[in-house]
Amino acid sequence: MPTVTIDGKRIKVKKDATILDAANKVGIWIPTLCHHRALSSDASCRICMVEVDRGEWRQLVTACNYPVRRDITVYVSSERAKQARRGVMELLLARAPESRELKELAERMDVMQTHYPTVTESQRNCILCGLCVRVCEEIIGQAAIGFVGRGVDRAVAAPFRQPSEDCIGCGVCAAICPVGTIKIRIHPDQQEVEISPFKSRAKLMVCRECGTPIVSSEVSKQVLSKIQINWEEFRESLQLCPKCKRLHTAGKLTSTIANKTGDREGVY
Amino acid sequence: MIRASTKFISANDIERFVQEFHDRADSASKVVRICIGTGCAAKGSRRLYELFCEAAKRSDQDIRVEAKCVGCHGFCERGPIVVVEPGEVFYQQVEEPDVAEIFRETVLGGRVERIVLIGNGRFDPTQISDYIVEGGYSALAKVISSMTPEEVISEVEIAGLRGRGGGGFPTARKWRSCREAKGSLKYVICNGDEGDPGAFMDRSIMEGNPHSVIEGMLIGAYAIGSEQGYIYVRNEYPMAVEHLKTAISQARDMGLLGKNILGSSFSFDIRINRGGGAFVCGESTALMASLEGRTGEPRAKYVHTVESGLRGKPTNLNNVETWANIPQIIKRGGEWFAGIGTEKSKGTKVFSLVGNVVNTGLVEVPMGITLRRIIDEIGGGIRDGKRFKAVQTGGPSGGCIPAEHLDARVDFDELTKLGSMMGSGGMIVMDENTCMVKVAKYFTDFLHKESCGKCTPCREGLSQMLHILDRITKGEGEVDEMEKLERLAELLEGTALCALGKTAANPVLSTLRFFREEYEAHILDRHCPAKECRGLFRYQIDPEACKACGICLKNCTVNAITGEKKVPHVINQEKCTLCGACWEKCPFTAVKKV
């Protein structure tokens, strides 16, 4: 097991663990935006730059995907590493100046403002970290969204920038978005969920009892196909909203107790 | 010389005569052929012949030199004509004082014959027989019949060949890493995605001598232990695709590609993949992503492609020119190749020499030649008698080298020291009328348009740089913006994901380093010294040169020019919109940019 020395702290990690893993273990914070431990690494945001000692020189690398293969020395809080991270943050702030989440992260990195004007257009503060794209492909398995355009025209969209037919409306993209670009909108009248800004819509499953939208029908279908429980009552309970489910359970419970009490009465 | 008075007494005598002649001719390793046709003779070629004979006699070198009179080439207007063999080096309008230099530089060495472009202009690229007859595939035969893979790699190592695609990584080391990488399935790739503006070295090799690339790949695959190769060539090169296709199918038909090549246990085949023309697909990981059918975007190379490349398998990628060097190295030996060039850069390099030079085109020169020789001797100097200002090497992410460094030797390390690079071999020469800020802006704009947009520094950083450069060329720049450019350049170099992003600031950095005063003139004086940036210079009529013809007056759309017959005309600067119509139309070049 190779040893990583981060800012003087030593830690043994498994071979091919990343610098970020090692830093997390010793409690050293490295900012990240495009990284999520459930997903493959992309290293596209470049906010996690750290310095690795190469003997005669030091190399700036991304902590989120640099694999530790032998003993290495890493500098997280060296001036050059800090400057690199702050420089990248300033560029991101110039792109998405309105993002509250980005500002909070910037402040944590001691970046109070950016020196650069806004010259690239972002869709609702999107910083193109690609988490949504990867989660949709790798975890959900739908690949309903992807990158379109090149360079400054790069954006996240469904194919041909049309509402996606593959989107199942699960909303994981909205949940993972670090800057709140992606939002879930419920349209109760049409019983549909919309993933904005992709305009993709999916049918909602409504509670059998009260008609409240619960979850997208496709998600429910996929979940049901994946769980191996064939207990009818359990399957039926999934078609109820949480409130009705509680009522349903409570009702059943009372009737069972009542029945049992009844039995006892019968003995007397 | 065999006397022509030999009397033939049997039919075999003619053959013997020819054989004897060839045996003798071979011993003369250099031949200088001087044209003594009527035209050349009239221009004094007989005297040139005598001078070459004298020089040959004086030479105490081991090389046997023979001067020879030959008949008319047909280019009488350009005579006297002298051709030096081997290499068929062609000289026109040779004069007496040139003899010493031609003898020294070309006959006795110095100027090296072509290695990579050896077949171009000699054989039909669609005929495999042309290639085989000239010694093609003999290197493959040698490798298969008598060399182990390790010996092949050692030979390339002795040659000291470095990657011609730009990075200059030692080819043998790459091959060895790939050979030693775990896994039985390995790939070799030829990178034919030549995307630098104005560069066409690789295209001419693929079009003109596709078999040299295929043979190189075969030898590489044998050394590495690969059975499948890919040639990734951009679709904008239809003839290259066509010729490669033909070459591959001919090689397959003749058993040079496919199963059990030349009766050995070695099998290898090649597929062609056409790229869509994105500049970034020339980057190895982006190219592999594109080959896999995904978007051509680079990935981090902390795990090298020789370990995990195409489809996660060990993959060895080399540039077209690198592959084309291999057969020659095997055929003539690594020692021979290492004898050409400088200590750390061996062999020759093909450059695409373009811009404001008299002779533009492809040149293959030995490593270590000075920039001055390429530009002045081969390029014939600057067009229209103007002054040299800078040469841009290494493609869009290379740098601009000024006149004071013209004696720098062209090799991987020297160019890097000057803040430029070898790149794939683009060479753009610029004269005194070129604005260096505008040059930096042009290349930054190119890279900005071609950036894939994956990583923040390249996408956002280049946008910011372009924004600043745009302001400077419009005369809106501010003093602190040069520093801002430098800060952005440093950020890009340190944090961008791929080599294209890391080097994207080179045009700006190198111009800032060597032509800082031009930036300052734009920012402080709001003046463009090269008078290229519109709005940062004025048009003025030189009263001495003005013939009062009235052409400028008629062509001025805003009536800013006043003047009468026989009175020099004047431009009203308040009204002038700087459209430049008067400057273009003046037949006496009396309208000047100031």
Image (cartoon, helix red, strand yellow):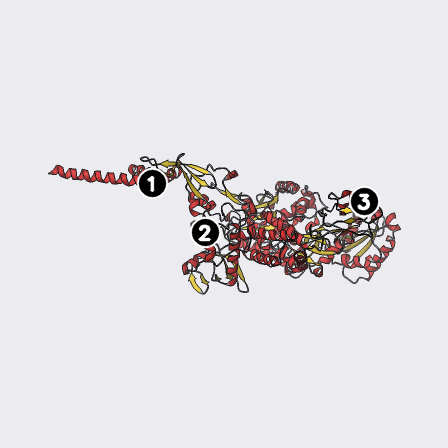
Question: In the image, which is nearer the foreground, mark 2 or mark 3?
Answer: 3
Give residue A159's mark. none
Residue B429, percent from left and from top: 71, 53
Q: Is residue A152 left or right of residue B100?
A: left
Q: Residue A261, relative to residue A49: is it above or below?
A: above
Mark 3: few/some/many CA within 10 Å (<14, 14-19, 20+): many
Can see residue B438?
yes
Residue that label 2 marks? A101
Q: Quadrant of residue B27?
A: bottom right
Label 3 is placed on what type of residue?
Answer: Gly
Question: In the image, which is nearer the foreground, mark 2 or mark 1?
Answer: 2
Q: Which residue is depicted at the point 77% across and 57% down?
A: B107
Between B476 and B5, the one nearer to me in the picture: B476
Label 2 is placed on what type of residue?
Answer: Glu
Say whether mark 1 and mark 3 are on the same chain.
no
Question: In the image, which is nearer the foreground, mark 3 or mark 1?
Answer: 3
Q: Chain of mark 1?
A: A
Residue that extends furthest to the right in the rendered view of this protein = B42
Q: Secondary structure at mark 3?
A: loop
Q: Is residue B536 left or right of residue A260?
A: right
Give residue A228's mark. 1
Q: Secondary structure at mark 2?
A: helix
Residue that label 3 marks? B550
Between B261 and B389, the one nearer to me in the picture: B389
Mark 1: few/some/many CA within 10 Å (<14, 14-19, 20+): few
Label 1 is placed on what type of residue?
Answer: Gln
Q: Could you tell me which quadrant the C terminus of chain A lies in?
A: top left
Q: Disc 2 to disc 3, how far (Cα)?
A: 66 Å
Q: Chain of mark 2?
A: A
